[in-house]
Amino acid sequence: MIQTTPIRQQRRKLINLIMLGFCMLATLLVIAPLIWIIAYVIQQGLPAINWSFFTQLPTPVGVPGGGIANALVGSAMTVGLGLLFAIPIGTLAGFYAATHPDNGLGVALRFSADVISGVPSIVMGIFAYTIIVLPQRHFSAFSGGVVLAFIMLPTLTRTTEEMIRMVPKSLREGSLALGAAEWKTSLSIILPAAFNGILTGVMLAIARAAGEAAPMLFTAFGNPFLNLDYRQPVATLPHTIFVYAIAPYEDWHAKAWATALVLISLVLLLNIFARLITWWRVRHIGTYH
């Protein structure tokens, strides 16, 4: 039996403390820029936020007041439509890639998801402009939702695949052994077991797509008025930030910071809501995580 001398123990403790210190320093270096950015956005944007900022439409240059009600509605329309397209496709693709990892189609799905995730969002915007806007001969919220669906798909596919793989094989085998069909096992056992992780993937996809401004330049385009028609252009939060930020007016600059703060806050609230749903499911339903 090897005995450890007090000197060696002290040296190990010292090395352990040094490594922990390096880890803490690295963590601070990663978190510090995020905290700095959020604090700066709050400092610049908070003074311009009031109730009318959420309920009123934009005003012309030189007219005080105005808000981003049109952009809030437009972002909800495009992101919601993107989720409607991306969730079923991404979930099914991720499920197939996880259950058939060595199949040719499964390999192709994983490779395609990795490739699409690396494509610049502005290229996706040009693609949606070519296949939707040009044939329709006008910009629309529908084209904006389609391009956001393309942006969400890789995140949803890869997250679903990883979450399905984390589900113990014994659950699937037990269900099949009891006589359940393959499709029923997938819907009733595997997907509910991976729901918490898939929901996290949905939130990541929303955060990834909600802040994209470049694709909106080629699809939704922007609209100073409130519009609920998916066939017409709409304003979105990132596009509004872009328009206000490049304008030579101080009032619009303040509104750009305020809109950025609203966008960050909405993404944060969505993530908190997803965590609350996960916590409720774990506590009351006993879902495997």
Image (cartoon, rainbow, N blue to C red):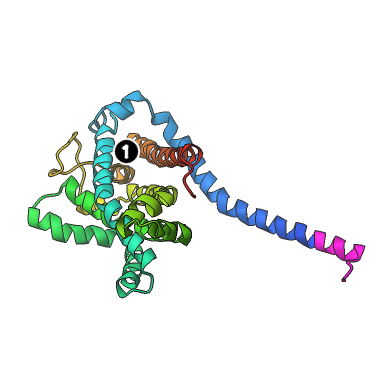
Is residue 89 in view from this perspective? yes
In the image, 55 versus 159, the foreground residue is 159
The residue depicted at 38 percent of the width and 70 percent of the height is 101
284 relative position to 111: left or right: right
Is 160 magenta? The answer is no
Q: Place residue 8 in its image quadrant.
A: bottom right
- Where does the image place residue 135, in percent across and percent down from the top left? 8, 57
The residue depicted at 33 percent of the width and 70 percent of the height is 106
In the image, 230 versus 261, the foreground residue is 230
The residue depicted at 22 percent of the width and 32 percent of the height is 60
Secondary element at tag 1: loop
- Where does the image place residue 274, in percent across and percent down from the top left? 43, 41
In the image, 167 versus 36, the foreground residue is 167
- Up-down: is 130 above or below 229? below
- Where does the image place residue 208, in percent across and percent down from the top left? 37, 52
Is 7 magenta? The answer is yes
In the image, 66 versus 252, the foreground residue is 66
Q: Place residue 6 in its image quadrant.
A: bottom right
- Up-down: is 29 above or below 267? below
36 relative position to 162: left or right: right
Q: Amino acid at mark 1?
A: Tyr
Name the residue furthest top: 51
The main secondary structure of the magenta stretch is helix
Name the residue furthest right: 6
Q: Place residue 152 in its image quadrant.
A: bottom left
Is residue 64 in view from this perspective? no
Q: Which residue is mark 1?
A: 249
Mark 1, other Cα within 10 Å: few <14 / some 14–19 / many ≥20: few
16 relative position to 147: left or right: right
The residue depicted at 47 percent of the width and 60 percent of the height is 170
Is the N terminus in the top left, top right, bottom left or bottom right quadrant?
bottom right
Q: Which residues are magenta?
A: 1-13
